[in-house]
Amino acid sequence: MAAARHASFSEVKDIVRSSEPWCLESSGLGTWYDDHVKLGADAFDRDCRAAVDKVLETVHELCSFNNILFDIDKVVKGGSLQKKTMLKDMCDSQLVVYINPPYMEPIVTVGTQKYRDQLRRVIKVLMEALKGVESVTEISPNPVSLKFKIRVGYRRLLDVDLYPTADNFRGHGEDLCNMFDAMLQSNEDGRELYTASLIKHQTHFVRSQPTAVIDFIRLVKYWAHDALPDNLKQAYFFELVTIHLWEETGKPEGFSKVQGFKNVMETLASGSTELRKMYWPNLYDNALAVRAIDKLNMHEPVILDPANPTNNVCKIFDKRSNRRAIARAAQVTLDTELLRDIRVRRDWSN
């Protein structure tokens, strides 16, 4: 298989410098954002949610014939659709489906190998059920989930990751610290098995941010979609970087999007060397964060997933080519009409 092609430096320049809003004067960013990012997103959001619910109901019904039951009321929804960071015509959804025993038992009860066997069987049944849903297309299984697309309306497609899981929290007595300890003792493949159990906490962390920050995240994600190759459009990374920089500037309730955006671009253009060891001790304490960084030999920059201390969302920078590609695109953007003459104030004030 041929390696993914990265845009050349001159191509990145042409794409960014000729595209709105990067070619606009800074005073035009607010109007452009309302017209091109916000407008239409609410209707698309509503259509996507209805489409997801219909698929879940159909899959639940079809799976019942195979005696693999899940409770629709115990489906956790994540992704940009649930975080409210979706863009107009650009949306993804994560669905965590809790499978009832005995078809799926917690990892701590059955061990990683049997858990993988359970996943394999359940994913096969779910895949067959999805094939019976008219609006579903491009179904692709992997060891922990199913990827597929849902047709929404006439031409739009919603990207979906469906994760079947056991109730792994309950398997550890609903003690997150016990589960994190178990993850630290496991290898990378074993830790991946816990992914689904943590999506609701990832979603809550982003969704709970102020509306102004959610809107700002949307702008940064729009830039990533416009300026970066597909393998670097990692939404959660950009969400957490944006939240971190907003917190670093003092968590202003109101702020200038263009100033905040230039701060993000400056950070990315620097190769993210300013992102040292960052974590949010909400679900785990400082000691566990430090232990995870040391035990897993994480290389700077480090931003720990607030829902998972074993996950460094800056891992994409382990490849120097990725770091260079992101820094290059950010530097090109800094040289555009939108940002060239902007001076970033400490509080991002208007």
Image (tube, rainbow, N blue to C red):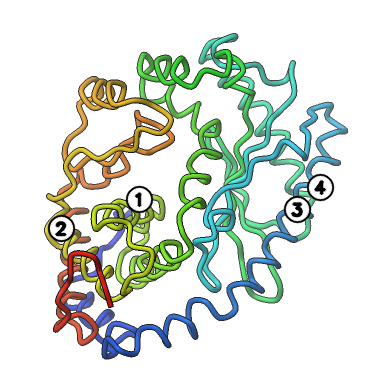
Within 10 angstroms of label 2, few (less than 14), some, or many (20 or more) residues?
Answer: some
> Distance between the Cα atoms at labels 2 and 1?
20 Å
Residue at (24% x, 84% y) in the render? 338
Front disc: 2 or 1: 1
Q: Which mark is residue 324?
A: 2
Residue 233 % position (x, y)? 36, 58
Instruction: Kindly identify which residue carries mark 1.
Output: 240
Q: Which mark is residue 57?
A: 4
Under mark 3, the amino acid is: Asp
Under mark 4, the amino acid is: Glu
Where disc 1 sits, the SS reads helix
Lower position in the chain sequence, tag 4 or tag 2: 4
**What is the quadrant of residue 325 in the picture?**
bottom left
Q: Are marks 3 and 4 in contact (CB under 8 Å)?
A: yes
Residue 223 % position (x, y)? 34, 70
> Distance between the Cα atoms at labels 1 and 3?
28 Å
Lower position in the chain sequence, tag 4 or tag 1: 4
Asked whether, in this view, residue 113 is left or right of residue 223, the answer is right
Where disc 3 sits, the SS reads helix
> Distance between the Cα atoms at labels 3 and 4?
6 Å
Where disc 4 sits, the SS reads helix
**What is the quadrant of residue 159 in the picture?**
bottom right
Under mark 1, the amino acid is: Leu
Residue at (50% x, 51% y) in the render? 208
Q: Which mark is residue 53?
A: 3
Residue at (85% x, 33% y) in the render? 64
